Image: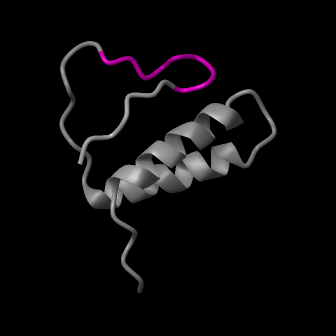
Amino acid sequence: MTLPQTTPPAHGAAENTGPLLPLLTLSESHDLLRLLQVIAAEDDELAEEAHWFAQQLTSRIPPEPAG
């Protein structure tokens, strides 16, 4: 599956330069997603960017198992 190249709305923090970092575990990915969703729910300058990153992460990881 090839995902389209997009850039985040606010600060351009996700640049495709440099080496890739080691992958997160699925558990770490879900923890990060929850954190991004909390930040995205705030009414501040980072909310839009956090929302964008949360959407990107959601599209790349499987749903969290129930239970």
Decide whether the magenta segment is chiefly helix, strand or loop.
Answer: loop
Residue 9 falls inside the magenta stretch: yes
**Would you place residue 9 above or below residue 59 in this image?**
above
Q: Residue at x 69, y 37 (%)?
A: 47
The residue sitting at the bottom extreme is 67
Q: Which residues are magenta?
A: 8-16
Q: Pick the residue in front: 55 or 3.
A: 3
Q: How is the image coloured?
A: one colour
Q: Residue at x 48, y 52 (%)?
A: 33
Q: Position of residue 40 (x, y in %)?
A: 67, 44
Q: Position of residue 20 (x, y in %)?
A: 20, 26
Q: Is residue 13 left or right of residue 49?
A: left
Q: Is residue 67 left or right of residue 1?
A: right
**Would you place residue 12 above or below residue 35 in this image?**
above
> How many marks do you count on the picture?
0
Residue 14 location, quadrant: top left
**Would you place residue 67 above or below residue 48 in this image?**
below
Residue 25 location, quadrant: bottom left
* Quadrant (top left/top right/bottom left/bottom right) for the C terminus: bottom left
Q: Pick the residue in front: 38 or 15.
A: 15
The residue sitting at the top extreme is 17
**Would you place residue 19 above or below residue 64 in this image?**
above
Q: Position of residue 29 (x, y in %)?
A: 36, 53
Q: Residue at x 23, y 13 (%)?
A: 18
Q: Residue at x 56, y 46 (%)?
A: 36
